[in-house]
Amino acid sequence: MTVDAAGPPSLQHWLHLLLVVAMIALVTLGALENRATGTVLPVVADDLGGLTWFGAATTGPGLTYVVAVVLAGAWIDRRGPGPAIFTGVGLFLLGQAVIATEPSMIVVVLGRLASGVAEGLFDIGITVLIVVTIPEALRPRMMSLIAMAWILPSVLGPQAAGLIADRAGWRWVFLLGGLLAIPVTLALIGSVRRAGGRSEPAEGPGLSTLPYAIAVAGTMGAAAALAPLAGVGGPAMIGGAALVLILVVAGIWCARPLLPAGTLTLRRGLGTTVLLGGALSVAFATGSSFLPLMLIERAGFTPGLAGLSMPITGLFWALGSWLQGTGRAQRRTTARLRVRTGFTGVAVGLFAVAGTAVGLVPPALGLAGWAVAGVGIGLASSTLSVHRLALTDDAEQGRVAAGSTLLGSAGISGGAVIVGYGIAASAPHPPGELFLAAFGAAGLLAVAGATLAGRIRPDRSDRPEPADPVAAGSRS
């Protein structure tokens, strides 16, 4: 079922409040796990004598996440979001307990793989839960709150995890994460039951999509495994680079059957909306992933000072998402304008840090530009998410959300592998020109996104876009 958009006009209304709090808590918990694990995992590997398995513990969850989102999409379209969300909570608890209690790094890797599956189930489950429980007019604000749930974990998560690991031991970081999941689960039970499941199984590809998801994960994993060839030099390095590019393209191509029709051909409406969401993720992730390294290598920052880019990203992303969810923005702007403005902001930030990499832009000004990019990603990503929900039939919300997430994940992984290969080839001190090329290419992708923003509308008429909740009215 879908709640009528003519219902209570506020997320603070009793009908929505418990659900809103529970979903934000779940997102916050996942964000804390993400940030905390990234902080203490090197300590875990060193303590357990398992540095050999560190790479698998770092990249493995991303691969299981890719498979999980596809399975979650088919499952949720048939059974509703409840079973997937609670299975995700169970796997999260299992993963945290396994990591906290086992003495072997191999078992820690298994726990991390379970966490990747849990995150995939969370992401798709929450997306569909918003559709079936939150009125359309309130969804922009809900998306803003979801984005803002990453602020505290991004700012305080690494410091808190480090403090707990120093004072009580790294195992308590994972034990506390598992304990926090229990009250969140209890708060979700009533709301998820009210959302219910499908009265009839929805038609769709079901498990037939699993081979495509495995193919995407496999090609990206294989591409990442080729990184050591970058340090060999000569023909092996060149051959490895060519193979990396082939695998990345093949991985994205494998995702094609899982996407809405017309995604890769920029069909107006849903197809372009999904493709631009993936392009936005790739462009911004390229900057955020390699900005700290660039600041250390090219601007002379200490690791602690370079880490300022992470809270800048979180804070300004939340600001941009909050702006798009305000009533004034929804009344006075269109979805395509917000998307175009957001892409433009991301491009400005990427070109600014590209200039910093080669000494053309002072580091302080580069970070200021990155703050603009943070506002841009918040503005555009939340708008695209709401727009996608409005253009998708209720019975296909899970499948489309899964395909969109898969496209973004494949693109981000592919970009990271390509840039990472270049960094490995130029180690130990990658040149500024490498960062210039990476950030510049991502900036051009953002410019292309701004240019194509008008195609998120299903037609060329002057009618308001479906994603404009005020103009579109109710939808059930």
Image (cartoon, helix red, strand yellow):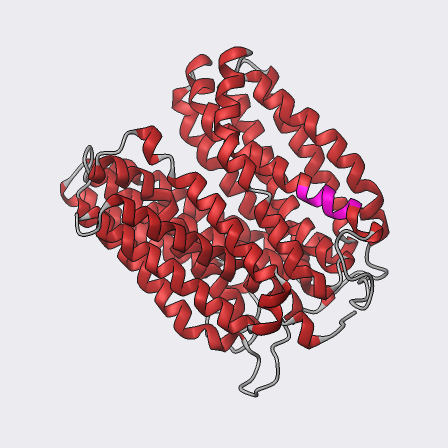
Region in magenta: 18-24
Q: Which residue occupies the extreme bottom position in the image? A: 461
Residue 84, percent across and down?
72, 45
Q: Residue at x 71, y 66 (%)?
A: 137
Instruction: Classify residue 472 as left or right of residue 356.
Output: right
Residue 375 painted magenta: no
SS majority, magenta: helix
Instruction: Classify residue 4 as left or right of residue 205.
Output: right
Residue 19 painted magenta: yes
Instruction: Classify residue 429 as left or right of residue 150.
Output: left
Q: In which quarter of the image is residue 93?
A: top right
Asked whether residue 410 is in view, the answer is yes
Instruction: Classify residue 445 as left or right of residue 162.
Output: left
Q: Which residue is drawn at 74% across and 29% down?
A: 182
Residue 15, percent across and down?
84, 52
Asked whether residue 204 is in view, the answer is no
**Viewport quadrant of the C terminus:** bottom right
Q: Quadrant of residue 465?
A: bottom right
Depth check: give the residue in front, 1 or 334.
334
Q: Which residue is drawn at 76% across and 71% down?
A: 475
Residue 46, percent across and down?
41, 16
**Viewport quadrant of the N terminus:** bottom right
Q: Which residue is drawn at 52% across and 30% down?
A: 157
Q: In this view, does 113 lie above or below 338?
A: above
Residue 75, percent across and down?
71, 52
Depth check: give the residue in front, 82 or 432.
432
Depth check: give the residue in front, 418 or 218.
418
Q: Which residue occupies the extreme left position in the image? A: 234
